[in-house]
Image (cartoon, grey):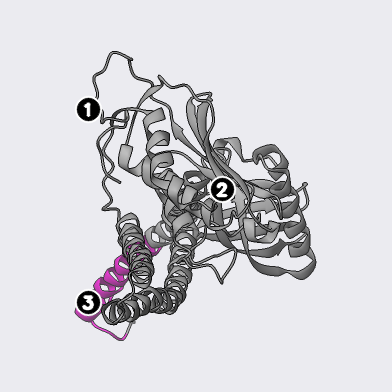
Amino acid sequence: MDHLDEKTQQQLIDQIKELQEELSEVRSELSMLRGDADTAIVADKNNKADWERVTTELQSFALSSDLELRAADMEKLNALMNVVLNNVPVYIFMKDANNDFRYLYWNQTFSDYSGIPASEVIGKTDYDIFVNKDDMDRFRDDDIRTVKEGRIEFLERYYTPRDESRVVKTIKTLVKSGNDAYVVGVSWDITDMKKVEDELIAARVKAEESDKLKTAFLANMSHEIRTPLNAIVGFSKLIVESEVKAEQALYAEIIEKNSDLLLNLFNDILDLSALESGTMNFTTRKLRVRDICTQLISLYTSKVSKDVDLVMDPVDEDLLIEGDWKRILQICSHLLSNAIKFTRLGKINIGYHQKEDNLLFYVKDTGIGILPQQASTIFQRFDKVDTFVQGTGLGLPICRMMVEKMGGKVWLRSTYGKGSTFYFTLPLKVCSSKTNYPLGKRGVIKESL
């Protein structure tokens, strides 16, 4: 630097000092930067640990919240499913196949129909719940068959503790989960449907029977009407043409007899129609029972065969009751005329007596009797002991229907070849003897048949 002038040298020295100062500042800044970097590294490490802790806590909170939400959802879902299962219109039940088929579930519909609350069922078997031994055994057999076959379907009837019969269509299915096995059942209660079906079947059978009866009725009536009508028409012509008094009297008797038959036939038809339609009137009043028998003897004495005696047995002559004079007399007339038809020798007895709370009437004859197989159907329409004897076969059915309408019953005892006894009862309503009656000359109440 000796060859430089003083001014130039001084300028160089100043520049070197400035550079030294700038270098010192740079070194200070570098030192500060290095310190900040070390501090930042430590801080970053601390922040990372805090973040990881917070993240772990957040994850734990999220997991616990998710579990709580899931539990709440499951509880809500279970409640919803329980509402659904309890309100479906079918029985739903589940049994533990590994624990003596004990009930694990029983819905409200099953409880409503059976009358057995679910609280009395869970953990119990069919043998602990139901009352009918046959039902218990059948349920157990069905469960065992379900385990063997996996699924069964059938129609069955069972009895509730209220002794009410229910009809159900059931499907049982075996459900497995690991080592666990369950019998799940679904049953549709079709009791009302079955009742309607039975009523429809009964109505169909009744309609078919009615159609057959109508055909039988027309076939019988055409014969029964034509026979007396032909006799009336034929002998009416003969009685005009005949000049012999004896012949005219005979023809007149035949005409009268057949006129009575025709009149009785129409009366039977009208009575049967009134009984079936429920329009027959029954009028109850005070009457003396003996007077009914007295009038019957008076009416039918001339109609029995000369070898037959018509007898009224000893009775309580002062017995007064409340009843329908006309209908009682009509029933007895049917039974008495029926006995007269089939009795040619011996006697016919008529009488009555008290039997507990009933008044028992009877008509006994020594006629041809009735075979056992005929006795079971004799009170049905158009059934006749002898088809060659005139008659519609409606008298005894009308008697039965009238007796039943008045609260009694009718039956017979018969020995073939020896005779028959017809009985009928009526509820006994005894009256006071202090009653005035409009009696006729022979002590018979004035009321026509």
Q: Type of residue at label 2?
A: Trp
The residue that disc 2 covers is 106
Identify which residue, 135 or 45, lies in the foreground: 135
Counting residues from the start of the chain, the first of labels 3 and 2 encountered is 3
Q: Is residue 127 visible?
A: yes
Which residue is at the far bottom? 3
| Element at label 3 | helix
Residue 337 is labelled as none
Q: Is residue 16 magenta?
A: yes
Q: Which residues are magenta?
A: 3-30
- Name the residue: 42% across, 54% down: 398
* Crowd class of label 3 (few under 14; some 14 to 19; many from 20; radius 10 Å): few
Q: Which mark is residue 438?
A: 1
> Residue 167: where, in percent of width, then height?
55, 57
Q: Residue at (44%, 57%) from the top-left corner?
A: 395
Residue type of the residue flagged with mark 3:
Gln
Numbered circles on residues, count: 3
Asked whether 151 or 293 is in front, the reply is 293
The reply to whether discs 3 and 2 touch (Cβ–Cβ < 8 Å) is no
Q: Which residue position is annotated with label 3? A: 11
Mark 3 to mark 2 CA distance (whole Å): 111 Å
Q: In the image, is residue 285 above or below residue 338?
A: above
Could you tell which of marks 1 and 3 lies nearer the N-terminus?
3
Q: Which corner quadrant of the image does residue 297 belong to?
A: top left
Instruction: Identify the residue shown where x is 39% and y is 64%.
Output: 30
Residue 137 relative to residue 121: left or right: right
The percent position of residue 168, horizontal first and vertical second, equals 56, 59
How far, Cα to Cα, is label 1 from label 3? 177 Å
